[in-house]
């Protein structure tokens, strides 16, 4: 057991992350939302330009009204009609300005809401990615051990299987990792250590396939 503990102190593992269909859908959703934000921002800018043009027209009409009013003493019916027309245009422009202001306010709220939703999607994706990475990391430790075991690099196999056991005391591969640590020790000629792990498999997982194989190995150690 002292050797196991010493070897476990120098563990290493590989991590990886595969892109899932959910991530693809999340990326597409995020791109659509970003495009909506850009479109709203452009529309908002166009509306602001129209708003400025209308204000300029209002100032121009107000100037005309002042000129007409200054000449009221010498006005005729044509001038009065022109003044009335200018005033009506002024009212129409003011109504349009009010509508544009209302539209701009709504668009600003929509942009804010879309940005908030986009940030929420990014946060959810980051959290899901972190969780997936953590799960994948635990899985990879066992896979790394498998790779060393198949190459008959017994020491590295022991290190990675033991790290998997330490991090996954209730993992689905716990019995298999324990049994293979015993095999690795046996292959290294360390029978006492191998027996310790075979006994653990038989004790903790008596009805498992690993326990059956461990019993066979234990009989072989006695010869």
Image (cartoon, helix red, strand yellow):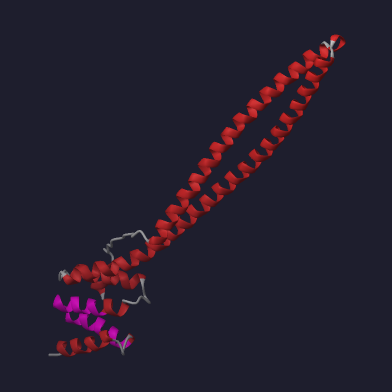
Q: Is residue 3 part of the magenta span, yes or no? A: no
* Residue under the point 16% across and 69% down: 153
Task: Give the main secondary structure, helix, strand or loop, of the magenta stretch.
Answer: helix
* Residue under the point 31% across and 60% down: 15
- Name the spot of residue 35 as percent of width and height, x first: 48, 45
Q: Is residue 184 part of the magenta span, yes or no? A: yes
Between 193 and 171, which is closer to the camera in this rendering?
171
197 vs 32, left or right, is left
Q: Quick check: can you spot residue 7?
A: no
Q: Quick check: can you spot residue 65?
A: yes
Quadrant that contains the C terminus: bottom left
Residue at the top extreme, as displayed:
74
Would you identify the image quadrant in which residue 182 lies? bottom left
Residue at the front extreme, as displayed:
77
* Residue under the point 87% across and 10% down: 73
- Name the spot of residue 23 as percent of width and height, x first: 41, 58
- Picture layout, residue 186 above or below residue 148: below
- Name the spot of residue 168 as percent of width and height, x first: 36, 72
Tell me which segment is drawn in magenta: 179-203
- Picture layout, residue 35 above or below residue 9: above
Between 174 and 108, which is closer to the camera in this rendering?
108
166 vs 196, left or right, is right
- Name the spot of residue 76 as percent of width and height, x first: 84, 13
């Amino acid at each position: 057991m002292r050797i196991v503990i010493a070897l476990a102190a120098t563990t290493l593992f590989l991590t990886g992350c595969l892109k899932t269909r959910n991530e693809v859908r999340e990326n597409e959703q995020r791109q659509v939302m970003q495009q909506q934000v850009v479109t709203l921002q452009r529309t908002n800018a166009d509306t602001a330009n129209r708003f400025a043009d209308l204000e300029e027209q209002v100032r121009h009409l107000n100037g005309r009204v002042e000129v007409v009013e200054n000449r009221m003493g010498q006005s005729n019916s044509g001038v009065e009609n022109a003044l009335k027309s200018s005033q009506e245009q002024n009212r129409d422009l003011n109504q349009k300005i009010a509508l544009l202001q209302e539209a701009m306010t709504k668009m600003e709220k929509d942009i804010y809401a879309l940005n908030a939703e986009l940030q929420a999607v990014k946060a959810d994706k980051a959290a899901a990615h972190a969780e997936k990475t953590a799960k994948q990391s635990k899985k990879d430790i066992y896979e790394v051990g498998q790779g060393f075991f198949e190459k008959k690099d017994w020491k590295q196999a022991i290190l990675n299987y033991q790290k998997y056991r330490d991090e996954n005391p209730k993992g689905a591969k716990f019995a298999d990792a324990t049994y293979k640590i015993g095999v690795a020790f046996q292959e290294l000629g360390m029978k006492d250590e191998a027996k310790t792990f075979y006994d653990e498999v038989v004790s903790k997982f008596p009805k498992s396939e690993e326990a059956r194989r461990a019993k066979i190995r234990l009989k072989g150690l006695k010869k």
